Amino acid sequence: MNTSENDARRSLQEIEDIAVRTRRMAAFAGVDLILIVWGIVWFLGYLGTEIIPRLALSLNPKLGPAIGWLIQGWWAILIIAGIAATLMVSRRNTPVESSIGKRIGWLWFALFGYMYVFGFLIMPFVAVQGHEESMRFWKHMGAIMATVPMFAYVVIGIWLDSFLVWVGLGVTVLTMLGLYLLLPWFWIYMAFVGGGALIGTGLVVRRKWRSQ
Amino acid sequence: MSELDPIIHQPLRLRILSALTTLRHDERMDFVWLRDLLGATDGNLGAHLQKLEEAGYLNVEKTFVNRKPKTLISASDKGRAAFRAHVNALREIIDAAPKEDEG
């Protein structure tokens, strides 16, 4: 079989190109849509956290203690919708069947479980006094809850591709900036900056990788 | 000296094995995604997969998911070894070629 040096170089280059595209496809099929879905969940969730108490109190000033449950319910609905959408996207975008996919699924399951169990366990011990202190406490809790899934992005990024490490670290830094510098507007900030960062990253991934 | 494998040497079959050997041993690729990745047609890809399967280079598993047929493909150990040998042969061709600065 006669193959010239140039043909051999071309073949090796092609092998390398296909390998890179395969790795990328296996790691990121559907990630663009999943980022957009969770960006929308964050946007609506944090926006609701800001708006629901105002709306509820204007309708019924005696609602006070029930507002926390309203917000929890709002987040629960959004998270369940987000998980359902993620499962649907993942089902339709599974180019490669592998054990790591299952591992990632269990990681998310464990994290959401951790966040909810943690939230319910600390509730009886929360001893904040008055509206102001309560608002500050929940904003700190909100920041912690936002960084937990971002921690998962970092872990999954270490397993798959450094791109997700940067998304996780970037959104964590933005969350901390909002917490330290813009506490009075933290929920609105997280809706637009946190949710917006996830949606924006999803759109960039979608545009960039579809054009390749 | 390694030799080029005539089965793998065909361009689409080389690309098929490039993709499949990139995956880990426990991973299998869906036919539709492989077709889109390689920019091949159903018929063309199917024919070349059959050649590779007959050579024992691939494992092909046909299943049904939600009543829809699904074909999962992976490189066999024999296929991985043959692909490695083919790549080595390509590298040897490049190494054996006279360098430009050697005049």
Image: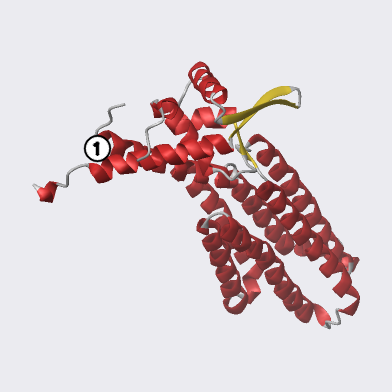
Circle 1 sits in a helix, a strand or a loop, which is it?
A: helix
Indicate left or right for A20 with A185 as reference. left
Q: Residue A169: give x, y in percent of width and height.
A: 56, 67
Is residue B93 visible in the rendered structure shown here?
A: yes
The image shows residue A37, relative to residue A52, as above or below, that is above
* Residue B94: % across, % down: 27, 42
As displayed, is residue B9 above or below residue A94?
A: above
- Percent from the top left, x then y, of residue B13? 45, 27
Please identify the quarter of the rendering in which residue A26 is found: top right
The chain ID associated with circle 1 is A
Label 1 sits on what residue type? Glu
Residue situated in front as seen by the camera: A35 or A178: A35
Query: As displayed, is residue A197 above or below residue B91?
Result: below
- Vertical placement of A162 versus A142: above or below? above
Q: Residue at x 64, y 76 (%)?
A: A183
- Residue reaching furthest front? B1
Q: Nearer the viewer, residue A105 or B1?
A: B1
For the point 75% across and 54% down, the residue is: A106
Residue that numbered label 1 is attached to: A5
Classify residue A158 by image quadrant.
bottom right
Residue A123, horizontal then vertical, whole percent: 87, 73
In this view, the residue in front, A79 or A156, is A156
- In the image: residue B78, left or right of residue A19: right
Residue at image point 87% right, 68% down: A120
Whether residue A192 can be seen here? no
Residue nearer the viewer, B30 or A51: B30
